[in-house]
Amino acid sequence: MIRSKKYWIILCLIGLLCLGGEGVAAPSQSQSDPSLSKPVSVLLYHPWEEGFEVTFRDHLDWLKQNGYQTIPMETLIDYLEGKEVSLPPNPILLTFDDGTIENYDIVYPILKEFGYMGTAFVITGPRFIRYSKKFWWKEVDRSGILKIENHSRTHSFIWINPQIIDFYSGEDPGDYFLIKGMDRRLGAPIYKFNYELINERYVPDRRIGNLCVNYVAQNGGKKFFKREGWKDGLFQVVKDFRNTRRQMDSYEKEPQRELRLKNEIYQSKRAIEQSVGHGKEVTFFAYPWGAYDEELILKLKKYGYRGAFTTDRGRNFPGDDLFKIKRFIITSEMTVEDLSNVLKSEWRRYLANPPCANP
Ligand SMILES: [Zn+2]
């Protein structure tokens, strides 16, 4: 659990926190002119973060004192679609990504205490569920306090091309934990990888992996990695192979890609619906790492989603794309002043003094 948390801290935040900005909008409401409409902010918390509970309670306290009221996701969608909806003076949505057990232990009781509601975007794959569990989905969703929606089946990376960036030495630093189908034999190549849902999968020649693994086994096994320049030896093995043999690598075909995406966005939707029962329909998706493209959006529409949440920073207005809903990432290091700045979109001041150490 501890190690898993560390991975998520590294993975989910890198590159997401200190991006972009957005202008200040007038507070009055008008359906005909979006620039005059009331903006709606969506906050994104990761409840597995160190120090989350204290920060979260402080933030809710501040939101309460400043008259913020949480609204259901359906209301936001209706509003963005331009329908007549009555919004409270300071509407806000609270979302929680990755589905770890802290959603149940911390988020759910605190939301209840404050009379707020939110949405937990969970990961449904068996490997992740080993850490995060799912026994609580039914209870929190049916309570109406913390709705369960989808954050993909595995939140994975995939190989994307033949470039080898490392070899497996028995360690899983950060990112490696989430590479789909990774070969965990000592010496196996780590190919260039990236976000699963927006990339074509590269399928390497297994013979290269086998050669590298054999090379390590014949040169001391685990001890091999203590040698100076051990990587050069393995790169040479790969080079010799590629210089003399025709590679039998490939990229996945369209039907394989279709199936992979279906697993990630539809099977996971069904898994939540079956766990929660009572006619539960999962209709919202949060993009893993906030990564999306137009093809993924088409697939989400095909599988019955009404909208999807990004990590693009900004507030939301009527007429905005329902599959590019913006969110503000809120970390456990952020004070109530930081939160206040985020909600007022005082980006210049905020970016000049970011509250986190991430790039
Ligand atoms: Zn995530």
Image: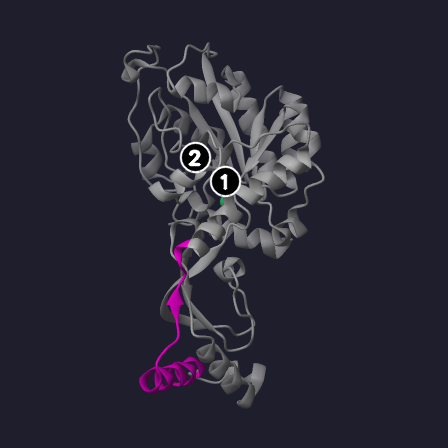
Front one among 258 and 84:
258
| Residue 15 vertical placement versus 219 (above, below) | above
Which residue corresponds to the image point at 29% horizontal and 14% vertical from the top-left? 36
Above or below, 158 against 353 in this view is below
The boundaries of the magenta stretch are: 230-254
SS type, badge 1 = loop
Q: Residue at x 56, y 32 (%)?
A: 282
Q: Is residue 96 visible?
A: yes
Image coords of residue 314 (percent x, y): 36, 30
The number of callouts visible is: 2
Crowding near pointer 1: few (<14 within 10 Å), some, many (20+)?
Answer: some
Residue denoted by label 2? 301
104 part of magenta stretch: no
- Of the two numbered discs 1 and 2 on the same chain, state the one appearing first in sequence: 2
User: Residue most toward the front?
Assistant: 255
Left or right for 200, reference 335:
left
Indicate the secondary structure of the residue bearing disc 2: helix
Amino acid type at image mark 1 = Glu
Residue at image coords 66%, 37%: 274
User: How far across and how far down the image is residue 113, in percent?
Assistant: 66, 22
Q: Is residue 21 left or right of residue 357?
A: left
Q: Is residue 80 above or below residue 277?
A: above
Circle number at residue 333: 1
